[in-house]
Amino acid sequence: STTDLLSGTNGAFSAGSVVTSPSSITSSLDVDQNFYTELEYAIVSTINASDGYCLRVTNNGTDLDSYATVAEMSLSFDPTISSIILNEGNPITLQPGATTTVYATGTVSDLNGYSDLVLATSTIYRSGAGAACVADTNNCYISNTSAGSCSFTDCAGSTCTIQCQADIYYNADPTDDNIYEGEEWLAYVEVEDAAGGYDFSSAMGVELMTLRYISTNQGIDYGTLEPAQDTGANNASTTIYNLGNDNLDIDIEATDLSNGLSSIIPATEQKFSTSTFTYNSCGDCGTLSSSTIQSVPLDLPKPSTPAPFVNDVLYWGINVPFGTAATSHQGVNTLYAVGE
């Protein structure tokens, strides 16, 4: 029998009937005057059903002439998500010192019509951080429709494309190498409709690639020196910024300095150090070469936040050999980012 679920009614409740048969007709019920009853139906709708089904009451098989209120069935379908894919299934390649926009996309359907879809959220994350992670530029990016970073597009009938975007910072954890090798970046997407029905799905994982990239603030200016003179304790300096997502050292490749004619200052006359020094008494300095790449343990750590940029300073000195022409000389020192 049924229980009293109605509100705002007059009279006494009389237990009704629960209909579980495929037939839409109940057995006969006797309802005394000033009593009311309830009927409960177990109804399973098909994909072809729509709102607007009404339930009629007969008096022992005879249709009633009029109704004060008509019982109408409304349909509520939960949304469904399929085919979620992250970054089109490709590895994520970052931009140095900036963000890279990555999309999680898929198909969402709601048999109540696409206008019933109201909310969407996504989490793009390193697998070790988990889908319930807190937003972090290293490993967890959260998007939603409220912020405009998730949207329903290309909607027709009961189906839309769900698209959520995240701007991944250059310092995001790589999974192709080092401590997170073996993990992947994943996407978790959840949608909700106006009735509170929801569904969720995840994308297959992709790699986030290691980015080794440095930038420098300026050229190396040794100032004005005479032949047979060195820079002494007056060091030129270069600030080196880590704009990638790995711990870095650097390699240096140098050319001889030339005045564009016959005068040459060999690359080996240049010294470098991670601290200030005096040219003729620096026992720990490195010496450049035009034939051999020099490695520098600069120890630039992986950035943990996008700003400020992680940086270190490299100091330079030079000696101008006797007999060098008293004109401007130029050369190129090329710095390469290498993983520790």
Image (cartoon, rainbow, N blue to C red):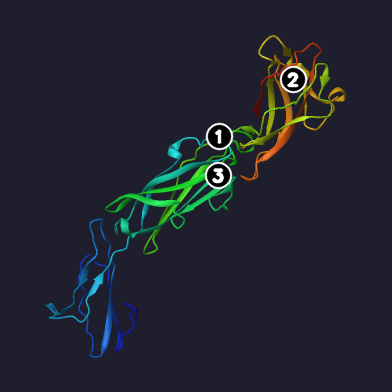
* Disc 1 target residue: 209
At horizontal 74% and vertical 29% (from top left) the residue drawn is 297
Q: Amino acid at mark 1?
A: Met
289 left or right of 162 in image = right
* Disc 2 target residue: 288
Instruction: Locate residue 277, reporting x and y percent.
Output: 83, 29
Res. 197 in view: yes
Which quadrant of the rendered structure holds the N terminus?
Answer: bottom left
Instruction: Locate residue 287, reporting x and y percent.
Output: 77, 20
Q: Would you identify the image quadrant in which residue 47 lies?
A: bottom left
Secondary element under disc 3, as helix, strand or loop, is helix
Secondary element under disc 1, as helix, strand or loop, is loop
Q: Amino acid at mark 2?
A: Leu
The disc, 3 or 1, on the residue closer to the chain's N-terminal end is: 3
Q: Amino acid at mark 3?
A: Ser
Front residue (pair 323, 70): 323
296 left or right of 308 in image = right
The disc, 2 or 3, on the residue closer to the chain's N-terminal end is: 3
* Disc 3 target residue: 127
